[in-house]
Amino acid sequence: MHIIPSHMKRDINTPTLEDSLKMYIEHSNIPLIIYLHGQDGTSDFGNHVVTLDYRGYGDSSGTPTVRGVVEDVVNLFKLIRNILPDNPITIWGHSMGTGVALLTIDYLLKNLKDYKQPSGLVLEAPFYDTIEGVKSYPLSRILKLNPFFMDAAMDALKNVSLDFPNHKLISTLPLPIVMLHAEDDLIIPYYHATLIEDYVKMHRNSSLPPVKLITIPKLARCGHNHIYSYPKFKQVVSTRYRDIHLYRYKHTIVLLILGSLVGIYLLISILFPLLLIIYPRIMNRIVFANFLTTFNNLRRPENLGLERVYNFYLDVEPGVRLGIWHFRSPLVQDQDFIDDDDYFSKHFLSQTDENGQLIPVILYMHGNAFDRAQSSRRELCSRLRDELKYHVFAFDYRGYGDSTSYPSERGLLKDSRTIYDFLYQFHNGRQRIYLHGHSLGSAVACQLAARLSDDESASLAGIVMEAPFINIHDALQTHWAALPFRWQPWFYYLTNRALKRSALKFDTKFHLSSVNCPVIILHADDDWIVPYRHGVHLVQTGIAIRQENRKNSKLPKFKIDMISFHKQGYGHRLIYTAPNLIQSLKRLTYDEDLSEET
């Protein structure tokens, strides 16, 4: 029998269950209940209910057996599933039907794996097991006065294979289960529910869906057969019923997400190595990531809340023009100007500090992706300018921000050298110039410092390398995004091959051996982009280089130190927020001797 929700009107021209299900259940998300012997009150809160009489009951023929009644329910389930393959189905058992429901679910999970399984189970007036059910049955309470009755009853149960191990099945079935039991139930007393609950707490794996008991109070006088008449039945049961489907929905979503992630992982594992083989220059896009931008108007830094910052452009070579910001030192007084030449004449060329010394300069080189307007970059430059009272210049390499052309390792180095020479020529080396590079920018800064060390006429005051890496290949290997693929045999070889074909090395460790100025390394131990061990390795390399330099009496100005930030949440980009950052950097900018530091 198909019982439709109470708000729907039945059409008498639906002679079969198949016709009825097809007519009234139009969508795959409409839930359905298979009800095993009981009332149809559940249709009142909007559910389709299919009920049946087991063999030997009502107008059903045959002789009832445990195996037979389970087979009846399984056949009904298969019939419904063939018509409604995806709809949520809950099996609802009452009294003896709870045992049938549990055995049916157990059978379905073990034998019908090609069908979508039931989404949940509702047990109304469940009994602990067959023996406990017989012992507590009202007639048995009288017959138990005969000392031979229970032995005879147990033998009879064994002979007919009448076994419902409800408590064991409830503790193991991997689906949400709701139990309903009235405190004044005289047929299957309420203590059965508490026995089941205690057994479940001891034996059910915590990773399985929940088993919940709803107690119908004695004052409601629902007894064994009238739980549906409980005034709050619709409210309580519909809430729990929704919980079953909500759990299934969440479980399905989790599986879909996990499946999607696995699929994406496998797809990348197949496509990425092929891409590296066919188009190795894809590494340029990965390393530089200059396609990412902040979408800010870089011509007007004041729109970003920056004060006393001047935007200008510098030509490096035909087709390459760089966008640059000058963060004016607080020691410089603002003046009106006509053009770039007039601006630098008034704000840079002739400016000195309170001691009459030329104001030092910091040339900032940012990392990959985005541009000079990224918040961490502009905040760092502002802080260096305000607290050190130095001039700070920040620029975008070719292909970044509003700078033209395309990036390459050689191109980035040429851009940096061009700006350095531009600043240097104002005072012919009498003004101290420092380099501050972050991540990829630290590799550019180190390489530029090595080149400048070869040119005695272009001396460098010092460099700061923030979150530096050993070389670009090591940086790729240790990046968090590479962790899922690093173990695969192709990853090391193909990434190294692609980098070589793209002429990308950014070998900081190699160039460090040619630097002839003080070096400070900044690194946070919670950096997931360029792990902390890169900075440690570089400072250890630098110490060894300095010892070798002393033996050979070369590169006398080279000295190295490292400032570490431990468990402070600075990661890869937030070191600029460290309260003691500027004070620590003064160890370099005030030319203190770092030779004894480690």
Image (cartoon, rainbow, N blue to C red):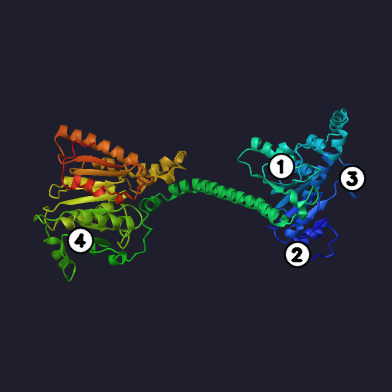
Question: What amino acid is found at the position of numbered circle 2 in the picture?
Answer: His
Looking at marks 1 and 2 on the same chain, the residue that comes earlier in the sequence is marked by: 2
Q: Secondary structure at mark 4?
A: loop
Residue at the far front: name it. 219
Q: Nearer the viewer, residue 509 or 407?
A: 509
Question: What amino acid is found at the position of numbered circle 3 in the picture?
Answer: Gly
Front: mark 2 or 3: 2
Label 4 to label 3: alpha-carbon separation: 96 Å
As drawn, the label of residue 56 is 3
As drawn, the label of residue 109 is 1
User: What residue do we see at 90% from left, 42% from top?
Assistant: 63
Q: Give the x, y percent position of residue 139.
A: 87, 39
User: What residue do we see at 86% from left, 29% from top?
Assistant: 155
Give the residue number, with chain letter if any, for mark 2.
7
Question: What amino acid is found at the position of numbered circle 4 in the picture?
Answer: Arg
Confirm or deny contact between disc 4 and disc 1 (CB under 8 A).
no
Looking at marks 2 and 4 on the same chain, the residue that comes earlier in the sequence is marked by: 2
Residue 324 visible, this orientation: yes
Q: Give the x, y percent position of residue 161.
A: 83, 34
Q: Please tell me whether residue 197 is drawn above or below residue 416 in the rendered image.
A: above
Residue 46 visible, this orientation: no
Looking at marks 1 and 3 on the same chain, the residue that comes earlier in the sequence is marked by: 3
Front: mark 1 or 3: 3
Looking at marks 2 and 3 on the same chain, the residue that comes earlier in the sequence is marked by: 2
Label 4 to label 1: alpha-carbon separation: 74 Å
Say which quadrant the N terminus sits in: bottom right
Q: Secondary structure at mark 3?
A: loop
Give the residue number, with chain letter if any, for mark 4.
328
Q: Secondary structure at mark 1?
A: helix
